[in-house]
Image (spheres, rainbow, N blue to C red):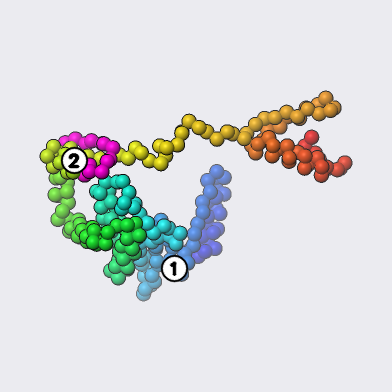
C-alpha cells in the first residue's frame, strides 16, 4: 500500500461514521516511530522483515526519577532494571542494544544516579533478562510470590527499606510504599476557576431587550458588540 492508497483508505473509514475520525502516518525512509519503538522495513530477496529498536523522541527529557528524591531505593532500582529489560526486549540487534543501553546509562547519570550503582543495576537487569529467557529463574520467582501471605501499604519515610526487608523475610508480608505528600496535595481542590459562560440581557432605548449567551466573559462580549455596532451599515445584518 503506497501513501496515496493509505490516504484514500483512511478517508473511506472516516466517511463511514462522522463521529469517529482516524489519522495515519506514512513511513519515512522505510522507518516509522510508534510509542517507544522504531519499526524499520527491510526488503531482502523478495522478503519483507521488520526491525524493531528502542526509540525516544527528540523532545523527551533525558531524565528519570531523580536519585535524590524521597522515594524508596527499591523503586529507583526497579526503574533501572525495568528500563534495561525494556531495551533488551525491544532492540533486537546486539550493536544497537549496546548503544541504547549506553543512552540509558547517560539518562540515569543525568538523574544523579551514582555511576557504580547504575552499572551494577544495569548488569543485574541484563542477567535477570537472560535467566528469564532460559526459564531458570521463573519457578523461584513464582515460589517467592506465593510465600507472601499478606500485603500492606504504608506512607514512605527514609529508612523504611529496612522494615520492608524484615516484613517480607520474617513475617511474609509484602510491603508497598505510598507517597501522600505530593505537590498536588498542596493545592486546594475545592477552589474552582469561575466560569465565563453566562446568559445576559441588554435593554434598548426602543423598549426592546437583547438576550445573548457567551463563553468568553461579559466584558469581552460587550467589546465584540460595540465593534459590530460601530462597523454596522444600513445594508448589513446586525446582532442587535
The residue under the point 50% across, 32% down is: 191
Whether tag 2 and tag 1 are in contact, CB under 8 A, the answer is no
Q: Is residue 18 above or below residue 103?
A: above
Residue 163: mark in rendering: 2
Q: Is residue 156 magenta?
A: yes
What stretch of residues is rendered in magenta?
A: 149-161
Extreme-bottom residue of the structure = 45
Q: Work out whether mark 2 precedes mark 1 in sequence or the reverse, and give the earlier one.
A: 1
The residue under the point 62% across, 35% down is: 196
Which residue is the site of mark 1? 30
Left or right of 192, for residue 57: left
- Which x, y percent locates residue 37? 38, 60
The residue under the point 52% across, 56% down is: 9
Extreme-right residue of the structure = 234
Q: Please name which of the two marks, 2 or 1, marks the residue nearer to the observer.
A: 2
Residue sitting nearer the eye, 68 or 23: 68
Residue 238, quarter of the rendered image: top right
- Which x, y percent locates residue 23? 51, 54
Residue sitting nearer the eye, 90 or 63: 63
Residue sitting nearer the eye, 135 or 187: 187
Can residue 58 be seen here?
Answer: yes
- Which x, y percent locates residue 70? 31, 46
Amino acid at each position: 500500500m503506497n501513501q496515496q492508497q493509505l490516504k484514500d483508505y483512511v478517508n473511506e473509514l472516516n466517511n463511514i461514521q462522522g463521529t469517529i475520525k482516524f489519522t495515519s502516518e506514512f513511513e519515512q525512509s522505510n522507518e516509522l516511530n510508534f510509542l517507544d519503538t522504531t519499526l524499520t522495513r527491510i526488503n531482502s530477496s523478495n522478503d519483507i522483515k521488520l526491525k524493531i529498536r528502542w526509540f525516544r523522541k527528540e523532545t523527551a527529557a533525558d531524565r528519570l526519577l531523580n536519585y535524590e528524591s524521597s522515594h524508596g531505593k527499591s523503586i529507583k532500582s526497579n526503574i533501572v532494571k525495568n528500563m534495561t529489560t525494556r531495551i533488551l526486549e525491544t532492540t533486537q540487534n546486539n550493536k544497537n542494544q549496546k548503544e541504547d543501553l549506553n543512552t540509558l546509562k547517560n539518562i540515569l547519570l543525568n538523574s544523579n544516579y551514582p555511576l557504580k550503582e547504575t552499572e551494577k543495576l544495569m548488569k543485574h537487569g541484563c542477567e535477570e533478562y537472560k535467566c528469564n529467557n532460559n526459564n531458570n529463574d521463573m519457578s523461584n520467582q513464582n515460589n517467592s510470590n506465593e510465600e507472601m501471605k499478606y500485603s500492606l501499604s504504608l506512607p514512605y519515610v527514609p529508612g523504611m527499606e529496612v522494615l520492608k526487608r524484615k516484613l517480607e523475610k520474617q513475617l511474609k508480608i509484602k510491603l508497598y510504599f505510598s507517597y501522600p505528600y505530593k505537590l498536588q496535595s498542596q493545592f486546594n481542590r475545592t477552589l474552582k476557576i469561575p466560569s465565563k459562560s453566562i446568559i445576559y440581557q441588554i435593554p434598548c432605548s426602543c423598549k426592546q431587550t437583547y438576550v445573548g449567551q457567551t463563553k468568553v466573559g461579559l466584558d469581552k462580549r460587550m467589546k465584540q458588540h460595540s465593534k459590530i455596532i460601530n462597523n454596522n451599515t444600513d445594508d448589513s445584518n446586525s446582532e442587535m
